[in-house]
Amino acid sequence: MVTLNAQQRAPGVSPQVGNPTLIFFGQLLLLIILWLSWPGPSAHAQDALLQGFVTDATSGEALAGANVVVYGSGQKRQGAVTNEEGYFLVDELSPGRYRVRVSFVGYVSHLDTLYLRDPRRYSVQLSPRQQALDEVVVTSRKGAAALNAGRQEIEPSDLRRIPTPGPGGGDLAGYLKTLPGVVSMGDRGGQLFIRGGKPSQNLILMDGIRIYRPFHAVGFFSAFPEDLVSEVELYEGGFGARYSGRISSVMDVSMRGGNNRQFEGRLALSPFLTSLRAEGPVQRGSLSFLGSVRRSTIEQTAPALIGQEVPMKFSDAFFKLQHAGQNFRCSGSTMHTYDRGRVDATRDRSVRWGNLVVGGRCAGFTPGSGSFSEVNVGLTHAFNEIGTKARTRSAHTWGLGVDMHLTHSLGETALIPGDDTKIQWGVYGRRDVWTYHLKEKFQHLRDGSSIVLNVGGHLGMEMSPIDNLDLKPSVALTQPFDYGVSVEPRFRMAWRPWGTEARQLNAALGLYRQTIAGISDERDAGASFTAWVPAPINERRVQALHALTGWRQDMGRLGLSVEGYYKRLTDLPVPRWSPRPRFTTEMRLADGRVYGFDTRVELEQGPFYLYLGYGYMWMQYTAPDGNFGEWFSDPLQSYHPPHDRRHQLKGIGSLDVGRFTTQIRWQYGSGLPFTQPIGFDTLIHWSGLNEHPASDAGTGRVLFQKPYRGRLPTYHRLDLSVEYVIPLSLGQLTLRAGGINAYNRQNLFYYDVFTLQRVDQLPLMPFVSIELETSR
């Protein structure tokens, strides 16, 4: 599974036999042959079914979450909710006449009468409402309070509610930081920790393709702005077997396709960011394109705006070509991101990272089969570097993968009661190449390269054995070469004791393993550098056990959710500690425990929106004393890692009045752990007699106490913005103004014990932006 270069080979790893690339593509060919030769189940001969897509009539965009309800004479109504591709399936229908209603919030409902005798393809286009209804009945609530065992659906309208100091509305990075289980080290560095997990333990997908560091150096922005995102499926834990290879969380981001009815363009300017977007039909009604380019301007504008340097630069570009057929939707996408800057402006070293993603996906159905298939193929490259001109550490990764998934409706069977049983299965193959060049700080990992070959699959079911109880058992089967087979069972459930989604008990339980590790120096908050390597110690993979349970309740316009979680982590690679700063990431193994709970309240009343979230989290790493260094003297050592933020309180408010929209966000976080110094001395290198004690005092050192026994000050910040929309004959003009850190709180980013210098987060950042959007 792992092949290193001649300079170093990981202990216990034998040379690879055969050509890894040929082996990998042989596996992929076998998977594709098996997939294509699999006999697609046919519909029950005595039943009718209705399947198709629901789309926006003005743009052709898929409408995920639309409700399709079929009413039959003398029968109970049956229905379905569209998936991220806009697909729906209503099966187990007896031949006869039916009334069909298709609805989606903000759109005119579609009503029709059909006579169904055989399986029927039935796609619907919904038109947006010109005016909001006085009373809207919401049958399925979405938003922050609609939390189902760690799972949340995030829509572009959710992102837009967050004050963001750039044009074009909200951004996924800003929204994620409003969730009570998400911890950010600061407004620089692009690092997110989700319910105790590290950034390297988060699985991030862009249209089914892995992307490693999509969050920009300035923490308000990511590669996923509101105007490009269709939907985000976020799992803060307890995710099903379809997702494998990471142990903390999943962000499955679906990028929207271009408008296949008319051309649209947008130009936006602000002191933080400039952006340009264009989209339109290539073949009207079926083939469309969407392109976007964005580039930061804060490096040039910060000295005049706030009187200090913000030496950071970032950019991203995205292009998507999408074809919408009667039975399928296929697309090809590419994304490029680049970040460069000094996370700490006082240090003479810069950090750079970037991504290149190229891939395609097809999703659709065979008429009458009751099956929905999806195929994703993608190539991804990521790099990050840190250092000065004289000394630079770098790490690169290349990955090629293909995965295929199928969902088939079984209807009601003799063995499984209920009329909504589905079986889901899929296969995948991946080849990843990791290279790294590490000096000074990384004492025991110098230069090297590794090849990771991995194949696997998943099998699961969705069933309702009794009314109002949904069960989703699944199992992931992974085979990393030279690591052995990994079997990871997962289970999710939902119980509605009063027969409605307005009151629902959710739970999840699962086992997760991760073959690769992200190595960084946890003591250095200003570094923001990660080297990816395969299981660095005795090929022992990181393992996590997730257990979640929660209650969700909707009370009209008010939504409430409470959820508790527990994670048990084993074989975590952590840096070996020492009483002096040797800048090493020699890895040792530790175990960890994480537990906590989230409480969320959400109110949406006409033009007014309010959200409050509180999160409590406790986490601890434990390992034998020898894994951290003999100087501690205790047989076991325990410490709270640097992202162990005990309390978080976050709130959002927005109000629409005419053409004005006002947005406000406030957040509070208790202090993060840090390691306190106990003294200073100097070190003279006697080897080689390179130094002369009479004239050279030696190299200064800082001696540490036990790791992370101190706590930094609390963090809180207020952001706000006001937006005004001006209709024009060619489109609309949007003006936005506001401020980040409005009351200019001096929040500590980190304390540099080597220079005894305090490094603060960004001060008050006023902003204005202008956005022109046209269509024809």
Image (spheres, helix red, strand yellow):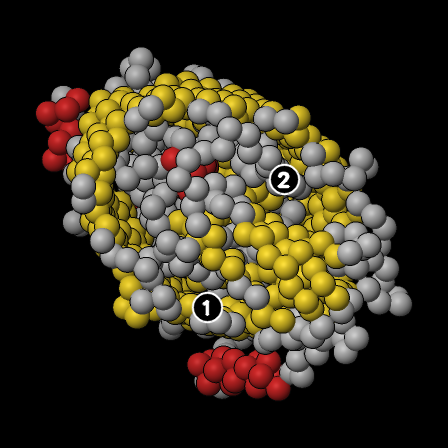
Mark closest to the chain's N terminus, 1 or 2? 2
Looking at the image, can residue 580 be seen? no
Residue type beneath disc 1: Arg
Is 673 in front, or is 248? 248
Label 2 CA crowd tier, 10 Å (few <14, some 14–19, many 20+):
few
Please tell me which residue is depicted at 79% across the width and 59% down the height of the picture.
Answer: 419
- Badge 2 element: loop
Please tell me which residue is depicted at 46% across the width and 22% down the height of the picture.
Answer: 608
Please tell me which residue is depicted at 43% across the width and 42% down the height of the picture.
Answer: 129
Is 591 in front, or is 444? 591
Q: Which residue is mark 1?
A: 329
Residue type beneath disc 2: Thr
Please tell me which residue is depicted at 76% across the width and 75% down the height of the picture.
Answer: 44
Is 80 in front, or is 727? 727
Q: Which mark is residue 738?
A: none
Looking at the image, can residue 314 be seen? yes
- Badge 1 element: strand
Residue at mark 1 to residue at mark 2: CA–CA distance: 27 Å
Do the CB atoms of the residues marked 1 and 2 lie less than 8 Å apart? no
Total tally of numbered discs in the picture = 2
- Give the number of the mark in front: 1 or 2: 2
Up-down: is 221 above or below 375? above
Q: Is residue 501 left or right of residue 431?
A: right
Q: Which residue is mark 2?
A: 139
Tell me which corner region of the image, top left, top right, bottom left or bottom right, holds residue 345.
top left
Q: Position of residue 363 (x, y in %)?
A: 51, 68
Hey, which residue is sitting farthest top in the picture?
743
Hey, which residue is sitting farthest right in the picture?
414
Up-down: is 399 above or below 522? below
Up-down: is 532 above or below 298? below
Up-down: is 101 above or below 723? below
